[in-house]
C-alpha cells in the first residue's frame, strides 16, 4: 500500500514489508490501542463478509438451498465434522468457538489476497492472540474437567518406567511450544507469501519488457497463496481441535 | 501522505521518514495493543454473529432437511409397500380368473362331448337300421334274380332242345334244368 519510496529515483526500490505497516485511518497521529487503523478496516470487512456469507445468504432457510446458503452449509458441515471427528463428541460444545477462529482466519487470509489490502493474519500480534486463546482454553478447560488428571497426559503410561520422566519433560516442553508454533506457522506463511509477491512486483517495475517473467511468477505464486490461505486456516483449526481433544477427550496415550 | 507528520507526531520507531517499514512491522510493539484490541472486538462480534444467529439457523435448516428427507423416504417406502400389495392383489385376481376360465372351458368341453356322444350313438343306430333294411332288399333282389335265371334257363333249354329237333316234353326239360341248377 505505501510505496512512498518513489522519491528515490533510480535503482531498484523494493519495499516488501511496507504492506504490513499499521496506519491510522484518519490523519497521521500516534497509534493508540483504540485508534481506528487499517487493522480495524480489514477486520471490519472480514466481519461484513462473514455476515454476508453466513447470515444474509441463509436468511431464507431454504430446504433446497441457494448457492450462497450451500456455501454457508458447507462451512458449517466441514467444521462441525472436523470438531466432532478430531476433538471428539465432547468437543462439539466448542463448535461455535472453533468456527469463530476458522471463519476469522479464513476470511482474513482471503481478504489479504486482494491487491492493496492489509492482511491482519500476517501479524504475529494477531496470530499470537489467537493461539494464546486456544492454549488458555485448552489448559483451563482441561484442568477444570479433569482436575489434576489433566497432567496425566504428560506421563506416558505406555512407555517403560525409566523413560517416562524424560518423555514427560519432552511432553511438557512440546505443550508449551504449541502456541508458538501455532501462531508463527500462520503468521509466517502469510507474511512470506505476501512479501514474495511484493518482491516480484518490484522486479516487474524495473524490468521493462521482460517484466512478463515476474508477472507470470506473481500469477503462479498468487495461485499458491490462495491454497496457502485456505490450508493455513484449515491447519490452524484442525490443530485447535487436536489440542481441544487433550482437554475434553479420553486420554489417548 | 505527509510523511514528516508521521515522524514528528508519532515518533514511531517502526517507520522511517517516508512511512516505509523499518525491519519487520510484525515486531513493532507500538502497534500491538491496537491490533490486539481490534482483534478481540472482531472475535467477539464474529462469535456472537455465529453463535446467536448463523450457526443455530444453519443447524436448524440442516436438521429440517434431514427430517424432511427421512419423512419423504418413509412415505416413499410406504407407497412402495402399497404398490407391492396392489400388484399382489392384481396377480391373485389374475390367477383366480385363469383357473375360473379353465374350469368353464373344461365344463363346456364335457358338455359338448356328451352331446357329441349322444348324436354319434343315434347316428349309429340309424345307420345300422338302414343297413339291415338294405341287406334285406338285396337278399330279396338276389332271390328274385336266381328265380328269373332258372326260368330263363328252362325256357332257353326248351327252345334249344326244340331247335335241335328234339321232341322232349317240357316237363322233362324243366326237371333236368332244375337238377342242373341245383348241382
Image: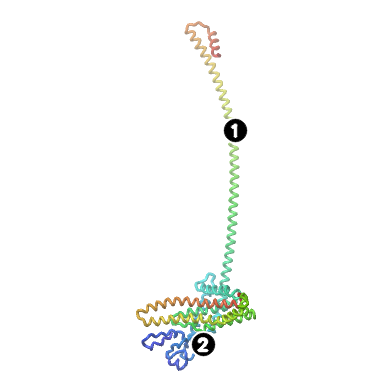
Along the viewing direction, whichever of A11 and B108 lies nearer the viewer: A11
- Name which residue lies at 50% across and 11% down: B157
Camera-near label (1 vs 2) is 2
Residue B121's disc number: 1
Along the viewing direction, whichever of A245 and A74 lies nearer the viewer: A245
Give the quadrant of residue B107.
top right
Tally of marks: 2
Mark 1 belongs to chain: B
| Marks 1 & 2 on one chain | yes
Does residue A214 lie above or below B136 as drawn?
below
- Name which residue lies at 59% across and 35% down: B117
Q: Residue furthest bottom?
A: B8
Along the viewing direction, whichever of A166 and B1 lies nearer the viewer: A166
Provide residue B21's location: percent of width, then percent of height. 45, 87
- Name which residue lies at 48% across and 77% down: A228
Provide residue B84's location: percent of width, then percent of height. 58, 57
Does residue B94 lie above or below A209 as drawn?
above
Residue A250 showing in the rendered view: no
Q: Residues within 10 Å of mark 2 (few under 14, many from 20)?
A: many
Residue B32's disc number: 2
Provide residue A87's location: percent of width, then percent of height. 58, 75
Disc 1 element: helix
C-alpha span from label 1 to label 2: 127 Å
**Tag 2 or tag 1, which sits nearer the N-term?**
2
Residue A231 showing in the rendered view: yes
Provide residue A44's location: percent of width, then percent of height. 50, 83
Disc 2 element: helix
Instruction: Tell me the quadrant of the picture where the N terminus of chain A can be found.
Output: bottom left
Q: Residue furthest left?
A: A209
Amino acid at each position: 500500500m505505501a510505496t512512498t519510496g518513489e522519491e528515490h529515483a533510480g535503482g531498484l526500490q523494493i519495499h516488501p514489508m511496507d504492506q504490513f505497516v499499521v496506519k491510522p485511518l484518519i490523519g497521521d497521529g500516534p497509534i493508540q490501542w483504540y485508534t481506528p487503523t487499517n487493522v480495524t478496516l480489514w477486520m471490519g470487512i472480514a466481519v461484513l463478509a462473514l455476515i454476508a456469507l453466513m447470515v444474509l445468504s441463509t436468511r431464507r432457510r431454504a430446504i433446497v438451498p441457494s448457492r450462497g446458503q450451500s456455501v454457508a452449509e458447507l462451512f458449517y458441515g466441514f467444521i462441525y465434522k472436523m470438531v466432532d471427528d478430531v476433538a471428539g463428541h465432547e468437543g462439539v460444545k466448542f463448535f461455535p468457538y472453533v468456527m469463530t477462529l476458522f471463519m476469522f482466519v479464513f476470511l482474513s487470509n482471503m481478504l489479504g489476497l486482494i491487491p492493496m489490502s492489509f492482511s491482519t493474519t500476517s501479524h504475529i500480534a494477531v496470530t499470537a492472540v489467537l493461539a494464546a486463546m486456544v492454549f488458555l482454553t485448552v489448559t483451563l478447560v482441561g484442568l477444570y474437567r479433569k482436575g489434576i488428571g489433566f497432567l496425566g497426559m504428560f506421563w506416558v503410561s505406555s512407555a517403560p518406567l525409566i523413560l517416562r520422566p524424560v518423555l514427560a519433560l519432552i511432553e511438557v516442553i512440546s505443550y508449551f511450544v504449541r502456541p508458538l508454533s501455532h501462531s508463527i506457522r500462520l503468521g509466517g506463511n502469510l507474511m512470506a507469501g505476501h512479501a514474495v509477491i511484493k518482491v516480484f512486483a518490484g522486479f516487474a517495475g524495473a524490468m521493462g519488457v521482460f517484466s512478463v517473467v515476474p508477472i507470470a511468477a506473481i500469477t503462479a505464486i498468487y495461485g499458491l497463496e490462495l491454497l496457502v490461505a485456505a490450508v493455513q486456516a484449515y491447519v490452524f483449526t484442525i490443530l485447535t481441535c487436536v489440542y481441544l481433544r487433550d482437554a475434553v477427550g479420553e486420554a489417548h496415550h | 501522505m505527509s510523511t514528516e507528520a508521521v515522524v514528528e507526531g508519532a515518533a514511531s520507531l517502526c517507520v522511517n521518514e517516508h512511512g516505509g517499514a523499518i525491519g519487520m512491522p510484525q515486531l513493532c510493539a507500538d502497534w500491538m495493543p491496537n491490533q490486539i484490541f481490534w482483534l478481540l472486538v472482531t472475535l467477539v462480534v464474529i462469535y456472537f454473529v455465529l453463535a446467536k444467529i448463523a450457526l443455530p439457523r444453519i443447524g436448524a435448516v440442516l436438521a429440517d432437511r434431514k427430517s424432511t428427507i427421512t419423512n419423504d423416504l418413509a412415505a416413499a417406502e410406504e407407497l412402495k409397500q402399497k404398490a407391492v400389495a396392489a400388484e399382489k392383489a392384481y396377480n391373485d385376481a389374475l390367477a383366480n380368473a385363469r383357473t375360473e376360465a379353465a374350469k368353464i372351458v373344461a365344463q363346456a368341453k364335457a358338455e359338448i362331448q356328451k352331446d357329441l356322444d349322444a348324436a354319434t350313438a343315434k347316428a349309429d343306430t340309424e345307420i345300422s337300421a338302414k343297413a339291415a333294411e338294405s341287406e334285406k332288399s338285396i337278399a330279396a333282389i338276389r332271390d328274385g334274380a336266381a328265380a328269373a335265371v332258372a326260368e330263363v334257363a328252362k325256357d332257353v333249354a326248351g327252345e334249344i332242345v326244340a331247335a335241335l329237333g328234339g321232341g322232349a316234353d317240357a316237363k322233362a326239360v324243366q326237371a333236368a334244368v332244375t337238377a342242373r341248377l341245383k348241382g
